[in-house]
Image (spheres, grey):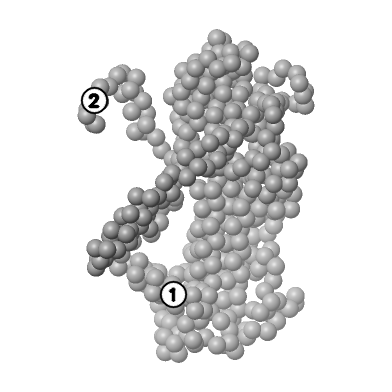
Amino acid sequence: MTPRGKRPTTVEGDRAQELFGSMLPGHQYALVKGLRDPAFPFITFIIEIPFAIKSLPPERVVVPLSGYRLGEPDDTEVRVKIAEVSARGLPSAAVVNYLLGLDGRAPADRKLLRGLQSRIQPSPTRAWVAELTTPNVLPGLEEANNSEIAARLFDRCLFALNRFLGAYLVAAEDYAVRPLRLEALGEYALVELRNAMGHPKGLGGILILPKATPPDSGYGLDDHEIAERLRTSMKHELVKHPMDRVVAWERRAAYHSWIGGDYEMSIIALMVSAEALVTAVWRTQQVDRGFQSDDAVNNQKDSYSKPPPFRRALQNVADAFDDSWTRESSDGPVAALWRDCYAARNEAVHEGAYVTHDILDVAFAAYTGFRRWVEQKTLEFAPQFPRTAILIHGPVGLAQHPEALAHVTMTLEEIRRNRELAFWLPPDEPRRF
């Protein structure tokens, strides 16, 4: 047996290793032979579906993509076959390992835990695998490389699979079924080449999918900084700091996008974060203006306790920051949020529209641009809205902007002197806890 780390290599193996080493999340790479080869008229991608399909069709379902020619030949059709298979999954022994690692564990306890660990056996599970077969042709990409060809063919198959799952969801009324995105499919799809009769002609290779990796967390914070921020966050939990909700919903949007691959829930969570941000800024601006909880601040009788709908709140915030945005505007961060995030969310919520990866990327860019706009404007208008600036940046953040900090120093001193933990509340509500 060749020792690990000293296995003989081949030219193909070296190339494969080089390709694997260059892979980045969010891209697709192919190690596939026989793409667009006339000897192999069909190509099949085999993937595991991350949920159960209870009632399986007994035969392949043909999904035409270029029209409604059911049963007729179609160069873009995809044949979907889903099968239930047996799998073996090892239960995690992490809890036992943790207990064994604790100091002061008695020898008898260690013996008991090791005995428990030895009794953890693989448990039978069930899994569902999809075969997605499509013609091994792709017109118009004669100069494309193998990775692009395989990725395009797989995208065609995934689109067809989602059509099938949509029909199955309506027919079976199965709440567990949902559209699938690349992030939810694991790390790779196996590729098999087939003849004109659909019979397998051998494994063609693998298609590496965008690996679902969690977003960067902590932004490089060390343990001491995290401990300090945690103490502050726990104080916020007592009074429900508005910006904590903004951040929490933004992180949920990132999770649904990068981990779960649920783009519709991602854009909904993203807009919840944006609306929470706008409402928090609108309310704190009214506190800075001296209004109390139930004081009507305009002709619509909006008040801190009854804030306006999102559109009017956004308009009021933009006006307060001397931004000329209207719903007809096409330029600027506020217009981008309205057009690329809010409108896309409404289509998903009110029309049941599916959100594509491209739409979601644009929505995240619009949201990020709007967050930066709020940060910039609260610094610029710190003299008029000191508590709003403190809400968005906090004392530590404002310390990095001495000019803005100079305008809120008196307000900060008042907050500290009165121990106003909930400083964003109107004066008629309790700010101390």
Q: Residue at x 66, y 41 (%)?
A: 54
Tell me which amino acid carries mark 1.
Answer: Met
Q: Is residue 256 visible?
A: yes
SS of the residue at dot 1?
Answer: helix
Q: What's the residue type where badge 2 is placed?
A: Met
Label for residue 12? none
Marking on residue 234: 1
SS class, disc 2: loop
Please tell me in which quadrant of the rendered image residue 309 appears. Answer: bottom right
Disc 1 versus disc 2: distance between alpha carbons? 56 Å
- Which is nearer the N-term, disc 1 or disc 2? 2
Q: Nearer the viewer, residue 19 or 50?
A: 50
- Where is the N terminus found, in terms of image quarters? top left
Q: Nearer the viewer, mark 1 or mark 2?
A: 2
The answer to whether the residues at label 1 and label 2 have Cβ atoms under 8 Å apart is no
Residue found at x 57% / y 76%: 284
- Residue 294 in picture, x, y percent from top left: 68, 84
Q: Quadrant of residue 74?
A: top right
Task: Name the residue carrying label 2.
Answer: 1
- Tell me: 89 left or right of 2: right
Bin the neighbour count of mark 1 within 10 Å (Cα to Cα): few under 14, some 14-19, many 20 and up: few
Apparent side of residue 267 relative to residue 348 in the rendered image (left or right): left
In the image, is residue 275 above or below residue 146? below
Residue 357: x percent and y percent? Answer: 57, 42
